[in-house]
Image (spheres, grey):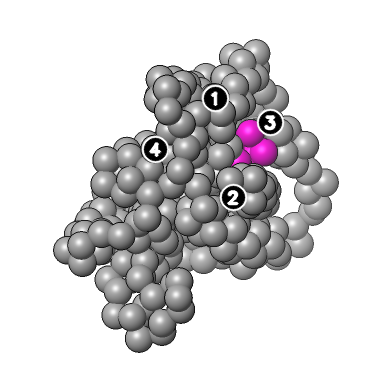
């Protein structure tokens, strides 16, 4: 349990730091495009084009953030196998706190009193969940469950990407939520993945859950980037928290055998509800990114001509 908690906290720190660095890179790229008066970098609906997203992804801040995301992914996958999903996913989703705190320094975002209160609620919820968590389930499921996970992941990620592009500049929270659902699917996939322990490469490659993990991870990363480009970093991250916490937690309890300590079920439920409510509150109370005017040392002058 202790090793799992430490691993989940480390994953949370990596994800939170990565999100802010990716936001810094996205905004730097957006400013350059704005300075160049480029109109080719948005879709007809006002959202970022694939080209603009790709340009954001090659800034050094974004690349460093992506490396941290991969490290966080590895740590999060380990935590998902060591802890009940309702605990591992909630602790990992506490990267919202890391994101909020770092965004004050790196993005110049000023958190209001309601946002600080919401963050305190999330912290309290994590304490409740850690106190109530019992044993994690075995993760042994029928192969049909693995196929269903792959089908749902493909439909959700493909359909979500199309919807986000249609909504354009209004899709920030939706993109964050969908990316969270993708990361949540990764947690479920890692738990049920065959061929991991003991390691068996042919079994691993033949498992549909592996491809659900790959699809959800790749598209989830893209949607998270879009959310950071067009919306508040705290709002997008809060929406991601809800997506990657609620569904995996419910699936873990109902189908994978996750459980709380005897007599602590109500504590786990209360902590879970408070964690999600606090995350949603950060998204609702957060001001638009007019309060996120960059405060980084980027008064750097772009070359003229």
Q: Which residue is mark 3?
A: 109
Residue found 64% across the figure and 39% down from its top = 99
Number of numbered discs: 4
Q: Is residue 106 above or below residue 197?
A: above
Task: Determine the CA span between mark 3 and mark 2.
Answer: 32 Å
Question: Extreme top residue here?
Answer: 113
Label number found at residue 4: 2
Is 198 in front, or is 67? Answer: 198
| Residue 180: image location, x then y, percent | 42, 46
Q: Residues within 10 Å of mark 4 (few under 14, many from 20)?
A: many
Instruction: Evaluate if marks 4 and 2 touch, with contact meaning CB atoms under 8 Å apart.
Output: no
Q: Is residue 151 visible?
A: no
Q: For numbered disc 2, what is the local secondary structure?
A: helix
Task: Determine the CA span between mark 4 and mark 2.
Answer: 15 Å
User: Which-is-in-front pick, marks 4 and 1?
Assistant: 4
Instruction: Evaluate if marks 3 and 2 touch, with contact meaning CB atoms under 8 Å apart.
Output: no
Is tag 3's residue or tag 2's residue first in the polypeptide sequence?
2
Q: Which residue is mark 1?
A: 128
Q: Residues within 10 Å of mark 3 (few under 14, many from 20)?
A: many
Q: Which residue is mark 4?
A: 259
Q: Is residue 246 visible?
A: yes
Is tag 3's residue or tag 1's residue first in the polypeptide sequence?
3
Question: Which region of the structure is painted magenta?
Answer: 95-99
Q: Is residue 132 above or below residue 285?
A: below
Residue 253 in which image quadrant: top left
Is tag 2's residue or tag 1's residue first in the polypeptide sequence?
2
Question: Extreme left residue here?
Answer: 144
| Residue 175: image location, x then y, percent | 39, 45
């Amino acid at each position: 349990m202790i090793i799992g908690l430490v691993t989940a906290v480390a994953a949370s720190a990596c994800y939170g730091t990565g999100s802010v660095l990716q936001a810094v890179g996205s905004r730097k790229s957006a400013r350059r495009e704005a300075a160049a008066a480029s109109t080719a970098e948005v879709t007809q609906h006002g959202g970022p084009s694939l080209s603009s997203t790709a340009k954001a992804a090659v800034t050094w801040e974004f690349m460093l953030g992506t490396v941290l995301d991969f490290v966080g992914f590895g740590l999060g996958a380990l935590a998902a196998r060591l802890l009940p999903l309702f605990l591992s996913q909630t602790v990992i989703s506490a990267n919202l706190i890391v994101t909020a705190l770092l965004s004050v320094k790196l993005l110049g975002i000023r958190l209001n009193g309601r946002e600080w209160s919401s963050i305190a609620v999330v912290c309290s919820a994590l304490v409740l969940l850690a106190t109530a968590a019992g044993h994690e389930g075995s993760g042994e499921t029928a192969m049909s469950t693995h196929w269903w996970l792959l089908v749902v992941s493909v439909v959700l990620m493909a359909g979500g990407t199309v919807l986000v592009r249609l909504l354009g500049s209004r899709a920030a929270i939706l993109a964050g939520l969908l990316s969270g659902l993708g990361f949540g699917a990764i947690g479920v996939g890692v738990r049920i993945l065959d061929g991991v322990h003991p390691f068996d490469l042919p079994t691993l490659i033949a498992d549909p859950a592996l491809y659900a993990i790959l699809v959800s991870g790749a598209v989830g990363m893209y949607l998270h980037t879009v959310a950071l480009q067009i919306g508040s970093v705290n709002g997008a991250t809060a929406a991601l928290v809800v997506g990657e916490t609620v569904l995996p937690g419910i699936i873990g309890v109902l189908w994978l055998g996750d459980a709380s300590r005897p007599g602590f079920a109500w504590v786990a439920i209360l902590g879970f509800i408070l964690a999600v409510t606090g995350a949603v509150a950060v998204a609702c109370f957060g001001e638009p990114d007019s309060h996120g005017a960059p405060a980084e040392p980027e008064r750097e002058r772009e070359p003229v001509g």
